[in-house]
Amino acid sequence: MKQPPVVRLDRTFKYQGSILKFYEDTILANGHIAHWDFIHHIGAAAVVPVTKEGKILMVRQYRNALDRYTLEVPAGALDTADEPKIDCAHRELEEETGFKTEIENLEFLVRVNTTVAFCDEAIDIFVARNLVPSKQNLDEEECIEVEEWTVKELEEKIFQGEITDGKTIAAILAYARKYDVK
């Protein structure tokens, strides 16, 4: 079935946040004019840090939008639009978990577009192995606890609705499937 054409007629800048730009798009769809919200995100990277024992290092942190603490894979926004996502993942691993690895030990796993209805955020997710202790380097407003979990435990938390973060769900399930981890 052929999709009817959708044409963006205009994009109007509305607001600049610290990592987001907000726009109003004027769209012609099905012969009707509509106004759609659009949020541009600089991009991000995430990492599935795997210990020698096969456990996953996770970060527990407060998320203002949900007004609660969440359990997530380490992740962060790019410093600049042209920063390679593997460099961002490498940096965020050490900053958030206090563990590091050589960049050659990062393997691309999957790309996730987090909220396709109104935002272009794309997160590249990597797997990190051969971790060595270092130290956390958190932003002054960050308060992150690092926890070790098995893939099975994390899958249970996903299916019980305890882990709801999209990038984390994609990361854990893709990792489990790709490497046949039980």
Image: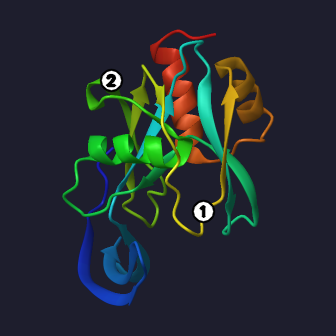
Q: Residue 78: give x, y in percent of width and height.
A: 33, 58
- Cα separation, mark 1 vs mark 2, equals 26 Å
Q: Which mark is residue 142?
A: 1
In terms of secondary structure, where does tag 2 sit? helix
| Three-letter code for the amino acid on which mark 1 is drawn | Glu
Q: Residue 140: give x, y in percent of width and height.
A: 56, 68
Report the residue at 45% width, 37% height from top: 47
Q: Residue 166: give x, y in percent of width and height.
A: 57, 46
In terms of secondary structure, where does tag 1 sit? loop
Q: Which mark is residue 12?
A: none
Residue 168 lies in what quarter of the image?
top right
Badge 1 density bin: few <14, some 14–19, many ≥20, Cα 10 Å? few
Q: Is residue 168 left or right of residue 64?
A: left
Q: Residue 139: give x, y in percent of width and height.
A: 51, 64
Report the residue at 75% width, 67% height from top: 67
Q: Nearer the viewer, residue 177 or 88?
A: 88
The outermost residue toward the front is: 134
**In the displayed structure, would residue 169 be above or below residue 42?**
above
The outermost residue toward the left is: 82
Quarter of the image that includes the C terminus: top right
Q: Nearer the viewer, residue 133 or 113?
A: 133
**In the displayed structure, would residue 143 be above or below residue 96?**
below
Badge 2 density bin: few <14, some 14–19, many ≥20, Cα 10 Å? some
| Three-letter code for the amino acid on which mark 2 is drawn | Asn
**In the displayed structure, would residue 141 be above or below residue 59?**
below
Query: What residue does disc 2 label?
Result: 105
